[in-house]
Amino acid sequence: MTTVLLVDDHPVVRSGLRAVLEAGDTVRVVGEAATGEEAVTLAAHLHPDVVLCDLRLGTGMDGIRTTSALRGLDPPPAVLILTTFDRDAEILGAIEAGAAGYLLKEVDPEVIVEGIRRAAAGDTVLAPDLAARVLKGMRSPLPRLTGREIEVLRLLARGSTNKEIARTLFVTEATVKSHLVHIFTKLGVDSRSRAIHVAQETGLI
């Protein structure tokens, strides 16, 4: 029987997953965690075969950082991401952090159970359309923006003007314009609206 640790910041989701998983005779839930930090602590003590982890965990560590920390344990559990978010940057981030797979919460319960079984066996678990996007992303990596460029993009997405961005970041407007040039070049766009659209679509912000 495959042992599983559930990680989700919503108690009702954890309860629903536990009920679904324990309805059969192939999976046993050995623990639940609401945060990434709690998940790592519990996994170190419980040694589950698989950690079923959400991507967004409220405050603290997100699913990607949690995955990386879990994979650093000895022995490391397989980590299967189960989430409602399917942005390319997050899928790639999870796989790069060591996740065995990535499933969306909209899938049928038997798909989750089968995913857990396959993750425990060392297989990669990705829906066909997600697998295609991961391969495409690995062949054409997302642009690497600096931390400051991400900050500028986030302020841009909130509708801030260059002057407002400069005031918020304690820099000159000339510096903001320089950041925008670099951002536009890296994203392959020619306008603020396109930069925001691409950044949101790819999960950069």
Image (spheres, rainbow, N blue to C red):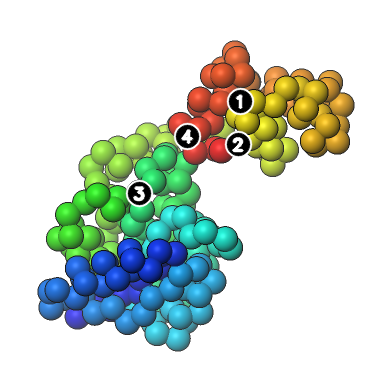
- Say if mark 1 contacts mark 2, CB within 8 Å: yes
Q: Distance between the residues labelled 4 and 2?
A: 12 Å
Q: Name the residue under label 3.
A: 84
Q: Which structural element holds mark 3?
A: loop
**Mark sitting earlier along the chain (3/1):** 3
Label 1 Cα crowd, 10 Å radius (few <14 / some 14-19 / many 20+): some
Residue at the location (46% across, 31% down)? 201
Q: Is residue 33 above or below residue 9?
A: below
Q: Nearer the viewer, mark 3 or mark 4?
A: 3
**Mark sitting earlier along the chain (3/2):** 3
In the rendered image, the residue lying farthest to the front is 12
Q: Which of marks 3 and 2 is in front?
A: 3
Q: Distance between the residues labelled 3 and 1?
A: 28 Å
Q: Specify whether 40 is left or right of 151.
A: left
Label 4 Cα crowd, 10 Å radius (few <14 / some 14-19 / many 20+): some
Q: In this view, does 100 lie above or below 47?
A: above
Q: Name the residue under label 2.
A: 144
Residue at the location (39% across, 82% down)? 47
Between 123 and 146, the one lying in front of the other is: 146
Label 2 Cα crowd, 10 Å radius (few <14 / some 14-19 / many 20+): few
| Residue 151: x %, y % from top left | 69, 37
Viewport quadrant of the C terminus? top right
Q: Mark 1 points at which residue?
A: 186
Q: How far apart are marks 1 and 2 (CA)?
A: 8 Å
Between 62 and 69, the one lying in front of the other is: 62
Between 64 and 152, the one lying in front of the other is: 152
Mark 3 belongs to which amino acid?
A: Thr
Q: Nearer the viewer, mark 1 or mark 4?
A: 4
Q: Mark 4 points at which residue?
A: 202
Between 147 and 109, the one lying in front of the other is: 109
Residue at the location (57% across, 23% down)? 195
Q: Which structural element holds mark 4?
A: helix
